[in-house]
Amino acid sequence: MRRFSWRTTQHHRPGLQYMVSTGRHHGFESMAEQKLLLALDFAGDLIEVFSQPFRLRFRTTSGWREHTPDFLASTHSGMLLIDVRPANRVKPDDRVRFAATEEAGLACGWRYLVITGWLPHVMTTLDTVSSQRRPLTDRLRLQDELLATVAADPLPFGELVASTRVPVMARAYALHLVWHRRLSIDLAEPLTDRTLVHPLTNGRVR
């Protein structure tokens, strides 16, 4: 509904985020929106995402207002309408717009979220894991070695990669397997060598 603009005097940073889920770049208007796109891509449920999908016009006691939601995501579990606004920038007028958007989404059978921020370590972990999201050539079959090692019981990340023939390279493959849902970690804690890595079977932790 709006064009993405780039100019030297603007106070936000727009750009394009590549998403493995769709195989394309998607527009964002701020770093906060870019973080959301990364999280959606990692979630593994995404089919398609549309930036600024429509303009909503609604009436309040003080007159007509408009709002353009930030994203509409199509997922395997349904449609998700999303606004992104840092918590310290949410004003009373924003709350009215968000409430109207939620009602419009509800009428369409869509879920609605307002993303106000992330725990710092979550985005650090997603940035780290996403660095190995693209296809990797595995001539040494280190991925098979990692999966076989952790098949019986979860292991700390550092211990898992150290058990392979080439630990330095195995770190990259372990992150790749986490991104692609073949290994699992707990995002509630920062990613370190002590983080437990779990095997996944049919998308579920064993």
Image: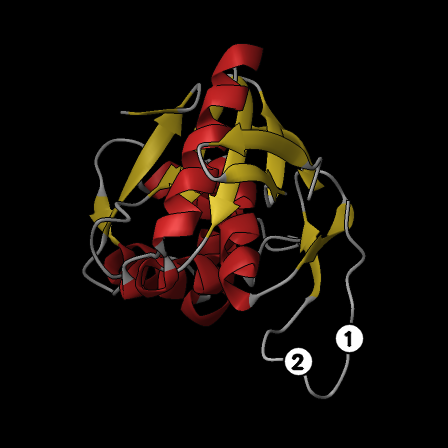
Q: Position of residue 2 (x, y in %)?
A: 77, 52
Location of mark 2 (residue): 10
The answer to whether mark 1 and mark 2 are in CB contact below 8 A is: yes
Q: Give the spatial CA distance, label 1 vs label 2.
A: 7 Å
Q: Nearer the viewer, residue 5 or 205?
A: 5
| Amino acid type, residue under disc 1 in the picture | Trp
**Colour approach in the figure:** secondary structure
Q: Residue furthest front?
A: 62
Location of mark 1 (residue): 6
Q: Is residue 56 above or below residue 116?
A: above
Q: Nearer the viewer, residue 116 or 167?
A: 116
Q: Position of residue 101 (x, y in %)?
A: 51, 31
| Amino acid type, residue under disc 2 in the picture | Gln
Visible residue check, residue 194: yes
Q: Position of residue 62 (x, y in %)?
A: 47, 39
Q: Is residue 15 above or below residue 126?
A: below
SS at badge 2: loop
Q: Residue drawn at (51%, 55%), measured in percent from left and top?
A: 173
Q: Is residue 44 above or below residue 186?
A: above
Q: Is residue 6 above or below residue 135?
A: below
Q: Residue drawn at (28%, 57%), measured in percent from left and top?
A: 157
